[in-house]
Amino acid sequence: MRKEITRLKKIIKNSNKIVVFSGAGLSTESGIPTYRGAGGLWTKYDPSIYANINYFQQDPSYYWRFFQEIRYPMIKKAKPNNAHLALVQLEKQGKIYRVITQNIDGLHQLAGQSHVIELHGNTRRFFCMNCSKNYSMDDAYSLLKKLFPPRCVCGGILRPDTVFFGEPLKSSELERAVHSAKKCDLFLVVGSSLVVTPAAELPIVAKRYNAKLAIVNIDPTPLDEIADILINEKASKVLSEIIEKTNS
Ligand code: NAD
């Protein structure tokens, strides 16, 4: 692995247009669990009830209880970890072109990252399903204590600005992500199982357009075979080492 980290460092040194593609694994060290796998949120909360747009439209109370009891306290407590911070350092070195994230936790931006493409939205933002008025997560939480489920001044029900199951990705974000994958010289996957499409097709697009592909993920992914560099270790450890080495 040490050899692979040194190789990745060299590739990063020679790259000027890196696209980082992050997934839930990047935020586990900030106390936000993945959805799938042991300890994942979906092992306790059925996504067809808690994260499906049709269910939400029929009965939003499940989502809002989940938000009140689980999501809000978890997101309020979470802080960017060393992996998020290392990516900001790479940006300061002029290496990063775009960060494409599947995460909805907003931790890249909280760490200070610019140019973040959020494929699945952001759970810190809410809007009214009737008039589209925007609300912050804290506003939504305060409203919730007075009115369950929370409603806008116009009477419409609030929803998170995230992509529910049963909804397409925002086409503008997906187009920006595909464009970035075509433009980059290194596509760096961090903490993603690469099983959720269409997001997981982006590394293939990048390879087709001659970028190198590096994967930093604890578990195997279906794209390991086409990766130029594969590191099965924790994101914070690998990225912190890369930063130390590129600084030296
Ligand atoms: P996933 O749960 O499918 O896979 C996460 C991967 O991260 C796993 O393969 C695991 O081996 C790896 N991993 C766990 N801890 C790691 C660490 N410390 N370092 C490196 N790798 C680590 O997640 P995904 O690929 O992002 O799947 C996509 C879905 O998960 C998306 O829909 C996304 O919106 C959602 N999601 C987001 C959040 C968040 O906002 N933080 C949390 C959970 C799930």
Image: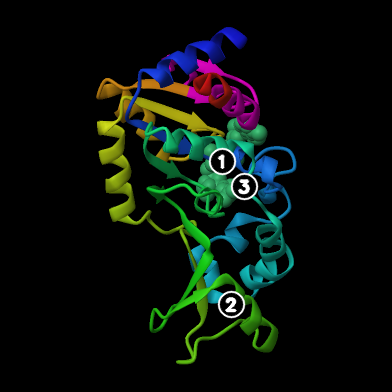
Q: Which residue is mark 2?
A: 140
Which numbered dot is residue 80?
Answer: 3
Circle 1/circle 3 CB separation < 8 Å: yes
* Of labels 3 and 2, the one closer to you: 3
- 49 and 208: which is toward the camera: 208
* Secondary structure under the numbered disc 3 in the rendered image: loop
Could you tell me if residue 222 is visible in this image?
no
Identified at 37% across, 55% down, the residue is 168
Identified at 38% across, 84% down, the residue is 131
| Disc 3 from disc 2: Cα separation | 23 Å
* Secondary structure under the numbered disc 1 in the rendered image: helix
- Quarter assignment of residue 245: top right
Q: Which residue is mark 1?
A: 84
| Disc 1 from disc 3: Cα separation | 6 Å
Amino acid type of the residue that numbered disc 3 sits on in the rendered structure? Pro
Whether residue 229 appears in magenta in the rendering, the answer is yes
The number of discs equals 3
Circle 3/circle 2 CB separation < 8 Å: no
What span is colored magenta in the figure? 215-242
* Percent position of residue 134, x then y: 44, 76
* Percent position of residue 63, x then y: 62, 68
Q: Quadrant of ligand 1?
A: top right
